[in-house]
Image: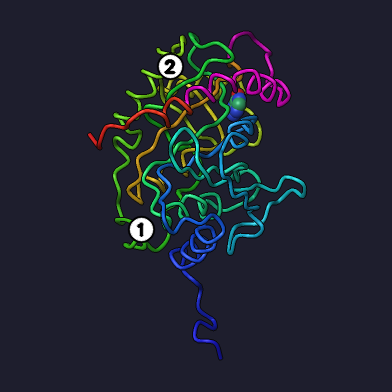
């Protein structure tokens, strides 16, 4: 009988095995990645700019969740970008696809086992703040979790972090300041605000838009918050950036289309790329 027969293998062990595999494939023995980047819709170009890249399909990585839709396989790109070693996750897993939040956040756990101190989360989001315009970038300053679950539900593994972590300040002030500077220097300003995560995949009704605004949210989307919670638990610094692909509640009967979301994300990718590359190129203040 194998020693672990009948015993569930812990996320700590699974993520450790995945991390070991990635470290070998990407020759990370001599260098530790300084940031992991999760790319939201339409941001593939950034991954293509990574130098000396090891490209590792998720399906090759031990324990990595399998894609639910064939042909939508994600991949990890590990290499150098703007003077830093980075791990880029191209292809995110969403709760609405049917994954558990443990599966959605497995990649973040792997970056923790690789010792990556900073997690950069990007997404496409609907604007709730009426001052926003489609194509704006929004730096996430805080979040509201309206997903029907929390990725930390279940037994806690103290090796990752405490039972009751506080997400206050999870969006790192120092990194936000650098991001603001980069945007300014690149000739644009970023919006800032609160991101609310819903489970999707249906978009919001008009009543839900009014309600979410009343909650104090500036943008709504179907991702990011589970990853940010797990990053907080594991002691990583987080920067979150939303591309506002559509502004909700502008006129009665207005509907959101996925094609519109993708088209606007594609148009905004130049600025998002400039923001992320500028951020990587600059020195980062130590934790506030
Ligand atoms: N709602 C939820 N998620 C989204 C939206 C939206 O309007 N746009 C892009 N992602």
Where ligand 1 lies, by quadrant? top right
* Residue at the right extreme, as displayed: 70
In this picture, which residue range is highlighted in magenta?
249-275
Pick the residue in front: 83 or 246. Answer: 83
Disc 1 versus disc 2: nearer the observer: 2
Q: Can you say whether 59 is above or below 78 in the image? A: below
The quarter of the image holding the C terminus is top left
Magenta span: helix, strand or loop, mainly? helix
Callouts 1 and 2 close, C-beta under 8 Å: no
Pick the residue in front: 18 or 162. Answer: 18
For label 1, the residue is 160
Pick the residue in front: 10 or 35. Answer: 35
As helix, strand or loop, the secondary structure at mark 1 comes to loop
x and y percentages locating residue 15 in the rendered image: 48, 61
- Residue drawn 41% across and 28% down? 279
The mark nearer the N terminus, 1 or 2, is 1
Beta carbon at label 2 within 8 Å of ligand 1: no
x and y percentages locating residue 64 in the rendered image: 59, 58
- Residue drawn 45% across and 43% down? 85
- Say few, some or many: other residues with alpha carbon within 10 Å of mark 2 (under 14 / 14 to 19 / 20 or more): many
Q: CA distance from mark 1 to mark 2?
A: 33 Å
Q: Quadrant of residue 52?
A: top right
Q: Residue 76 shows which numbered tag? A: none
* Magenta stretch contains residue 268: yes
x and y percentages locating residue 220 in the rendered image: 52, 27
Q: Quadrant of residue 12?
A: bottom left
Q: Can you say whether 110 is above or below 190 in the image? A: below
For label 2, the residue is 183
As helix, strand or loop, the secondary structure at mark 2 comes to helix
The quarter of the image holding the N terminus is bottom right
Q: Is residue 21 visible?
A: yes
């Amino acid at each position: 009988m194998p020693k672990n027969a009948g015993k569930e293998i812990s996320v700590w062990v699974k993520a450790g095995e995945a991390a070991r595999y990635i470290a070998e494939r990407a020759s990370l023995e001599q260098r530790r990645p300084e940031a992991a980047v999760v790319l939201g819709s339409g941001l593939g170009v950034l991954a293509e700019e990574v130098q000396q890249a090891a490209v590792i399909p998720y399906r090759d990585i031990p324990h990595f969740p399998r894609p639910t839709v064939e042909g939508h396989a994600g991949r990890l790109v590990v290499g150098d970008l703007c003077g830093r070693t980075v791990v880029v996750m191209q292809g995110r897993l969403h709760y609405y696809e049917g994954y558990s939040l443990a599966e959605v956040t497995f990649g973040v756990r792997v970056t923790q086992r690789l010792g990556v101190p900073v997690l950069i989360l990007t997404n496409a989001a609907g604007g709730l703040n009426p001052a926003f315009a489609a194509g704006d970038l929004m730096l996430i300053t805080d979040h509201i979790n309206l997903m029907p679950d929390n990725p930390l539900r279940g037994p806690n593994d103290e090796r990752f972090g405490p039972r009751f972590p506080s997400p206050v300040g999870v969006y790192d002030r120092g990194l936000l300041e650098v991001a603001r500077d980069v945007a300014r220097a690149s000739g644009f300003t970023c919006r800032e605000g609160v991101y609310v995560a819903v489970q999707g995949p249906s978009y919001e009704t008009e009543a839900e838009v009014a309600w979410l605004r009343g909650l104090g949210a500036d943008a709504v989307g179907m991702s990011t918050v589970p990853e940010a919670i797990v990053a907080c638990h594991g002691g990583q610094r987080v920067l979150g950036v939303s591309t506002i692909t559509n502004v909700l509640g502008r006129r009665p009967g207005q509907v959101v289309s996925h094609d519109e979301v993708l088209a606007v994300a594609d148009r905004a990718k130049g600025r998002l790329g400039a923001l992320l590359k500028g951020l990587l190129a600059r020195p980062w203040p130590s934790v506030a």
